[in-house]
Image (cartoon, rainbow, N blue to C red):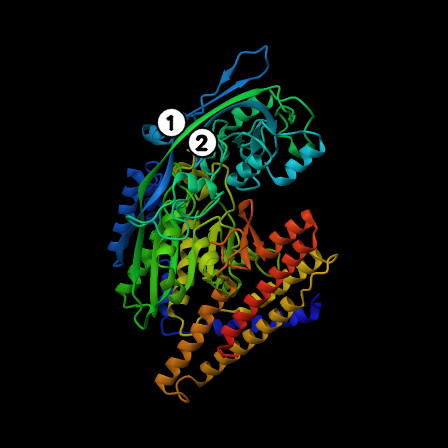
């Protein structure tokens, strides 16, 4: 374990490096102007959000193409050269579905309507018929009848608890709650447990305000009892029929049978249902009483686990089509280094109206575009090229961004500085951010320049830190948004940010402009703030002569992960010495490149000729840019070869969960089950793989051949 004093010294070194990140540039005045009140406009953001969310706009449908045209027009009017990058991808839509419950042999069957109710005075009632029937994208078509078993959140540990209770789910239809893991993981785990169908509902305790007189939208922020969270159950990324290559015209495609064999699409039918329908089914389930932490709100029925006596008949038919999706790409060419790319992106498609997810982020992207357009009119030109991306078909499985990354793989791998992501820009109050560690300081510095939208007497950084000594910055190991292809597949540094963390009407038809206006951000000041931070980080990366990357932050993070790993395997013979040594090498390399940065700044303008200075800066920046790539391995994670990053990756059954050293922990999980010498040898192999990757990163930062 690292001594506290050593860790404190490393923190001091990293903190002292901060001044190097923000050496004043001739363009600093433009950066200040970008976040000034004269350029920001909450009324404009509100208008963008209203326009984008007037109709439901699912990927591949006409309304989403209209939304793409609107984004393109805003880019063009902001003097940003723009185009549509389209792909032909496999999309899934519902054809028919039905759900019937027979509570007991003595009772008549209950047929569920499976409809989200329009509330009185709903301003979107005229287009409510355009909302697709509630479904799971890529769900298996099927017709199944079986007793119901309640499985809590449908996690592996929930099935382990059922096994302890003597409950067998094989041959049953399981009822699971949304809330803890990705819905695709819920279906996959159920299949592996022997279930023949899956129902997933939004419990009132989690999404409906907890019952006992709680109000719901439009009177409060909570999900109405008939509300349903739809979404994809695809466990891969990108077009399922083109794994690893872009879905261009006339490209090679896998057959439906080959896609099923890949293991990324479900093999049993599933359906999302409402809280009221979920509770009706729960009332029909007998058997052992569920544990206290599996129970619902105070006025909910007692939750038993079953199986039965309630019998459910689930029928679902979907269709898969090869449809057109449209990414909108805007480019502001760099004046001095046009071949270096700073990329920012947000997706546009939504399951329904998408006011929070994702168009609060789209509205912020358009605000950034308009501010950059105004800066150009005042004479600003970026040093490096800025690429603004509005992705399509993210909801189906990050398809638009993944196909674009796969098509541009080599160019991005050699030219991309960073990718800056915003998905749902505003859920509510409170700032949250994640990043690859070398960008931590950038986020901290940017939030110190922006006012807290909910308390103008302090900066956003002050509210973000709160009572802590430093803000909590998450990591990008999940596959939950469009940063995934950039980080996991190519090893490009990235950030992700938003206001608020989750909201109750997620992926339902109630995620509309009215919800945002009443509960998410009534004054649209949070939208302005996220655009300010997003754009400011973009400008610093695009304009700084020396890239503001801090790999000491990365070394500190890796040391923490190694310490945690050491605790996890303390009772094994796994040798972590190679990993610990490689992390020490990274610390030394990061310190040395910081010293080189300092030397360049001190010698700038008199000891070096312009040409020599320019080449030295370029060479140092290339090392900083490419170091993240070294954390990837061409073979990828075992059994998941598309995921190349060995430091960050998603949990096997939960795309929303982030893991450090995913290959090592996957191997440990298997070894603990089989407990064979061969399985523990494989854990050691994974430790060596990560060690080599960290060492390669150090070599790139050092910039010298061995």
The residue sitting at the right extreme is 571
The answer to which image quadrant residue 618 occupies is bottom left
* Label 1 environment density (alpha carbons within 10 Å; few <14, some 14–19, many ≥20): few
- Relative height, residue 417 to residue 591 (above, below): above
The tag on residue 218 is 2
Instruction: Using residue 262 as the reference point, say whether residue 149 is left or right of it.
Output: right
Contact, mark 1 vs mark 2 (Cβ under 8 Å): yes
Residue 465 shows in this picture = yes
Report how far apart the C-alphas of labels 1 and 2 lie in the structure: 9 Å
The tag on residue 597 is none
Query: x and y percent of residue 347 in the render?
Result: 38, 48
Residue annotated with mark 1:
121
Query: x and y percent of residue 279 in the render?
Result: 57, 24
Q: Nearer the viewer, residue 626 or 424?
A: 626
Query: x and y percent of residue 561 in the render?
Result: 63, 60
Instruction: Using residue 668 as the reference point, say whether residue 135 is left or right of it.
Output: left
Q: Going 34% across and 28% down the picture, which residue do you hit? A: 129
Q: Secondary structure at mark 1?
A: loop
Q: Secondary structure at mark 2?
A: loop
- Relative height, residue 510 to residue 628 (above, below): above
Q: Going 51% across and 16% down the picture, which residue do you hit? A: 110
Image label count: 2
Residue 548 shows in this picture = no
* Label 2 environment density (alpha carbons within 10 Å; few <14, some 14–19, many ≥20): some
Query: x and y percent of residue 538 in the render?
Result: 40, 62
């Amino acid at each position: 374990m690292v001594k506290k004093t050593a860790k404190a010294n490393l923190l001091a070194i990293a903190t002292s490096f901060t001044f190097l990140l923000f050496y004043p540039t001739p363009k600093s005045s433009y950066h200040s102007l970008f976040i000034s009140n004269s350029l920001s406009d909450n009324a404009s953001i509100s208008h963008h959000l209203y326009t984008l969310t007037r109709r439901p706009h699912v990927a591949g449908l006409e309304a989403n193409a209209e939304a793409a045209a609107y984004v393109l027009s805003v880019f063009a009017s902001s003097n940003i050269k723009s185009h549509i990058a389209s792909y032909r991808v496999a999309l899934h839509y519902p054809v028919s579905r039905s759900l019937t419950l027979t509570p007991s042999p003595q009772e008549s069957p209950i047929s569920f309507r499976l409809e989200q109710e329009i509330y009185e005075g709903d301003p979107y009632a005229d287009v409510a018929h355009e909302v697709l029937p509630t479904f799971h994208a890529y769900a298996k078509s099927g017709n199944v009848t079986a007793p119901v078993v309640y499985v809590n959140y449908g996690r592996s540990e929930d099935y382990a608890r059922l096994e302890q209770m003597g409950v067998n789910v094989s041959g049953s239809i399981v009822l699971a709650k949304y809330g803890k893991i990705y819905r695709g993981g819920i279906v996959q785990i159920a299949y592996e447990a022997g279930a023949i169908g899956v129902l997933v509902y939004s419990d009132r305790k989690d999404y409906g305000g907890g019952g006992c007189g709680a109000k719901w939208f439009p009177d409060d922020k909570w999900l109405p009892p008939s509300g349903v969270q739809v979404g994809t159950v695809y466990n891969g990324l990108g077009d399922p029929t083109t794994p690893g290559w872009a879905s261009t015209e006339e490209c090679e495609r896998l057959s439906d049978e080959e896609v099923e064999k890949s293991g990324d699409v479900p093999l049993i039918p599933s359906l999302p249902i409402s809280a009221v329908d979920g509770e009706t089914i729960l009332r029909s389930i007998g058997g052992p009483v569920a544990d206290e932490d599996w129970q619902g709100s105070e006025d909910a029925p007692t939750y038993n686990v079953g199986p039965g006596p309630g019998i459910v008949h689930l029928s679902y038919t979907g269709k898969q089509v090869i449809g057109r999706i449209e990414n909108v790409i805007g480019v502001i060419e760099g004046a001095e280094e046009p071949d270096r790319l700073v990329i920012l992106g947000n997706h546009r498609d939504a399951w329904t109206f998408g006011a929070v997810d994702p168009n609060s982020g789209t509205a912020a992207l358009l605000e950034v575009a308009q501010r950059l357009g105004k800066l150009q009119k005042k004479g600003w030109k970026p040093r490096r090229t800025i690429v603004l991306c509005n992705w399509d078909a993210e909801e189906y499985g990050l398809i638009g961004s993944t196909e674009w990354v796969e098509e541009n793989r080599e160019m991005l791998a050699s030219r991309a500085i960073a990718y800056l992501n915003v998905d749902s820009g505003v859920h509510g109050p409170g700032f949250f951010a994640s990043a690859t560690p070398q960008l931590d300081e950038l986020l901290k510095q940017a939030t110190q320049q922006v006012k807290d939208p909910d308390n103008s007497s302090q900066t956003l950084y002050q509210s973000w830190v709160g009572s802590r000594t430093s803000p909590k910055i998450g990591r990008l190991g999940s596959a939950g948004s469009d940063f995934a292809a950039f980080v996991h597949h190519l090893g490009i540094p990235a950030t992700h940010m938003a206001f608020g963390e989750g909201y109750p009407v997620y992926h339902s038809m109630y995620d509309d402009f009215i919800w945002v206006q009443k509960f998410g951000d009534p004054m649209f000041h949070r939208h302005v703030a996220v655009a300010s931070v997003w754009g400011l980080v973009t400008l610093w990366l695009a304009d700084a002569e020396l890239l503001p990357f801090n790999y000491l932050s990365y070394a500190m993070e890796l040391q923490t992960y190694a310490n945690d790993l050491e605790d996890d395997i303390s009772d094994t013979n796994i040798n972590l010495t190679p990993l610990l040594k490689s992390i020490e090498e990274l610390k030394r390399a990061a310190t040395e490149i910081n010293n080189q940065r300092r030397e360049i700044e001190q010698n700038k303008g008199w000891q070096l000729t312009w040409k020599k200075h320019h080449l030295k800066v370029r060479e140092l920046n290339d090392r900083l840019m490419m170091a993240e790539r070294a954390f990837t391995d061409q073979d990828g994670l075992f059994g998941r070869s598309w995921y190349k990053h060995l430091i960050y990756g998603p949990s096997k059954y939960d795309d929303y969960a982030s893991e450090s050293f995913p290959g090592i922990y996957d191997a440990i999980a298997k070894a603990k089950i089989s407990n064979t010498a061969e399985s523990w040898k494989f854990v050691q192999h994974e430790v060596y793989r990560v060690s080599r990757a960290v060492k390669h990163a150090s070599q790139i930062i050092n910039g010298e051949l061995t």
